[in-house]
Amino acid sequence: MDFKLFLVNVAAAIFTLLGTKMFYMVYGKFKVQKNKRIAYAFSSLPSPHIENSATNDEAQTLPRNYLHDVFPSFHGADVRRSFLSHIMKEFRSKGISPFVDNEIKRGEFIGPELKTAIQGSRIALVLLSKNYASSSWCLDELVEIMKCKEDLGQTVKPIFYEVDPTDIKKQTRDFGKVFNKTCEGKTNEVIGKWSQALEIVATIAGYHSNKWRDEATMIEDIATDISNLLNIVIPSSHFKGLIGMEDHMRKMEPLLRLDLEEVRMIGIWGPPGIGKSTIARCLFNQYSEEFQSRALMVNIKGDYPRPCLDEGSAQLQLQSQMLSKMLNHKDIIVISHLGVAQERLKYKKVLLVLDDVDRLAQLDALAEKTSWFGRGSRIIITTEDLRVLKQHRIKDIYKVDYPTDDQAFQMFCMYAFGQKYPEEGFEDLARQVTYLAGNLPLGLQVMGSHFRNMYKEEWEREIQKLWRSLDGKIESILQFSYDALWDEDQYLFLHIACFFKGYLIKEVVEHLKKTFPDVKQRLDVLIEKSLIYMFYSNIEMNSLLEKMGRDIVRKQSHDPGQRQFLVNDGEICDVLMGDETGSRSVIGINFICYEDEQIISERAFEKMSNLQFLNLRRGCCQKGNETTTWHLPHGLSYLSPQLRLLDWWYFPMTCFPANVNLKFLVELNMRYSKLEKLWDGIKSYHYYYRSDFLVKLPSSIGNATNLQTLNLRECSSLVELPSSIGNLHKVSYLNLNECPELKVLPVNVNLKSLDRLDLRNCSSLKSFPEISTNVSFLDLRGTAIEGVPESVKGWSRLLHLILRGCKELLSLPQLPDSLTRLDLNKEARDLLLQRSTRKITVLPGKEIPTCFTHRANGGSLKVELSERHFPSSLIFKACILLVEREEYYETRSTPTGLYYKVYSDEGTVMRDFHKLFCTITEHLYIFEFQIEDVTSNKLFFEFVIENFLRKWVIKECG
């Protein structure tokens, strides 16, 4: 396919995504019409982004060309000649097409014609009156309506006409008497279905006749609401089928809290193209019927004047548009001040969606305060800029995460193949394109649409082009946020895109603080602008944004040696093989070589006097498991003194050039190198060092008094550390992981700042490391230690102690109260279980140990005592298993305490409380307590976790 056609498809698709009406682009099916913009169309065919599951097969049975707008379910004798006739007339005056049953003969059961009418209506209006339940016909209608609501996502609106919803839900009082009479002679199955349908419909938000002063106003208001609903209603089954959308809807529920009467503002935040607008619109369509008034404001950023020379006028125009939509005015309402919104909406329960906000002035115009809106209102704001939400003091913020790899692959396949999986022979190609799109729904849609209906040979050609350069139209969308940055922030963005993606944030700060004195604040700006994101403690970036950043650098010069960063493998090879082919412009080289041999010229780095970051690694060669050989035939004459990071795996020389002076070096990583020793006279800097040949560190390491991180991981020949490391009081992280020959650590030292000590798989280490009493994390798994010294109880900062796989360990002393995680073998755990303590002990475990003779699921159990004559007091040891509810993994909710109560048939015996300083899922919490004056041989124990959102639950107790 011609690449120009790709640009046409991309431009059309992007225009649709950003349009104000057709928001289903990322998740929907598209139809390209000649001389027309792409538009979303409902059809009988599955949407490309709809999952083909059993549930969705049912959803596809919902007619796309509806037979009726409204299906009214009612008891004729109660309302046909009064309320019903008036509301039907009002419907017709507003162009609403209701189903009319005059010609259907009513019998014992509802027939196929009536079922078709129910299924073919967009909204079911259930008019519940005093004698509604006297008709089995009405009750069967209601059962069918509830089935359509569940299976097809049909909208149901009940009208409680001179009846109490509670009587309907519980089938009590006059309504219950009528219902019971109808149930006479019916089977339990039929009665159960009727009763369940009544219970459900009674809980749906609807209209109560006792809330209106007169019937005429009530009818007019209901008809207006139904008219508004018809303008926006889309079956919720469509949203359930959107890949990943159910997860978003579930995670939004704790933020929306529709059960509360307070006014809430909720932010939806994420990078461009990730689906924020789609989520907001799905929420709007799913919940709008529960609100008295509603408005969806789209593309606010795009419609706001830039530059805005008259902020006040722009705000007035924006509020006018919002009020016109909210109050259902065909013409724009003219307002003279921003207080009009509060005057018109303060007594209305509204749902307001503000899509694509990027300035605080926009929020001030549309939703400055919660007091502008009536009780129960919800305002949903989508933005790429977290600072806008923070400036508006919005605390409930939903960060839209990228889809999982599987979801992204399914999304792409929906666009490319019209199904969740690729056609035969296309899987590898489809996965390559999915990777290029970086799990970004925008990229998945654009690229999937481009590759649709291509032959395999065309796929292969187009993928080669995409690897070389981003398409300009995609880049233009992603670059919008980049162009709005200050120059320094743009410069930092390029550092991350070309070099530091995937690095720990603390490493990035350390490496870049010389270039960017306020690097932490600038990183926050990039995070808030959704240009980078945090994954655990690492800085990450969407691959489309990364590729865009690298393209920006590529365009700096046709000569690679004149650019700031070198990232293209072929260009780096040319530069390294040449003499003085670089320049002072180069500050970073990031190269993973996959060739069998890479020649590096002796003078390759001579002109790169400003080189600060050098990363030379190698990957598996095409032959198999062999690795690249760095070949320096004449050695190396020069390395820039400005280097702050030197990461050179398999460095082939046994020592550095004699003239090397790396005075600004922050990190030295020479993994698998042939270096036999480090030079004497080490300056005060921080470094990582990895080598298979290193036997011991020089004693001069103790002179590096500013050293903060010492990483000696996988130094497989390292036997000992010099006692001079006792001078390294600024070291916070010491990594000796995978040093199997290490036998001993220095004694009589106490590193003041050491926080993390990693000794994993130091299989020759027999003595417990006592080099610092200040560590919070100590990993000793796979070592040969035989015991833990008594002094460890005084390590007041120790939080995590990992002893799993220590096969020689048979005993443990008293551990510090600060400990929140203990990972150890079964023998040591059983010893701890026998230890007496009134404080909570936290141990790993997925079930209550058998030594607890009374066990039960949940948080309560009964204990029967055998004693007839009880002592004055009894001591009990209790154990609970605390777990996290899966649906709340993404929420932040920490238990604050454990309440427990003991009572008998005679009343409460005791109650108490333990404060929980830590919470770890699938861990056991063990403690003792004493009960005085026991007089009953039957005791009941209850344990309750105090926590918000009920995220944490007690799975078992004993």
Image: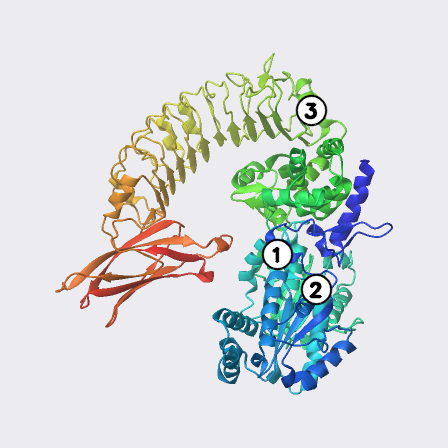
What type is the residue that disc 1 sits on? Lys
Instruction: Using the image, tell me which numbered label, if any, was put on residue 886.
Output: none
> Of label 3 and label 2, which has the lower sequence position?
2
Mark nearest the camera among 2 and 1 is: 1
From the top left corner, tell me how far across and down residue 485 is, in percent: 69, 47
Q: Farthest residue in the right direction?
A: 35
> Of label 2 and label 1, which has the lower sequence position?
1
362 displayed left or right of 173: right
Quick one: quadrant of the N terminus? top right
Alpha carbon of mark 3 to alpha carbon of mark 2: how far? 50 Å
Instruction: Using the image, tell me which numbered label, if any, was put on residue 240.
Output: 1
Indicate how the structure is coloured in the image: rainbow
For the residues labelled 3 and 2, say whether their Cβ atoms are less than 8 Å apart.
no
Instruction: Using the image, tell me which numbered label, if any, was put on residue 296.
Output: 2
Please, what secondary structure does the residue beneath circle 2 have?
A: strand
Alpha carbon of mark 2 to alpha carbon of mark 1: how far? 21 Å
Instruction: Inspect this view and state whether residue 731 appears.
Output: no
Alpha carbon of mark 3 to alpha carbon of mark 1: how far? 47 Å
Mark nearest the camera among 3 and 1 is: 1
Please, what secondary structure does the residue beneath circle 3 have?
A: helix
From the top left corner, tell me how far across and down residue 413 is, in percent: 67, 43
Q: Is residue 210 above or below residue 829?
A: below
Q: Is residue 331 above or below residue 389?
A: below
Mark nearest the camera among 3 and 2 is: 2
What type is the residue that disc 2 sits on? Leu
To which residue does mark 3 refer?
Answer: 570
Q: Farthest residue in the top direction?
A: 633
812 displayed left or right of 651: left
| Rendered image quadrant of residue 311 | bottom right
From the top left corner, tell me how far across and down residue 420 is, in percent: 64, 44
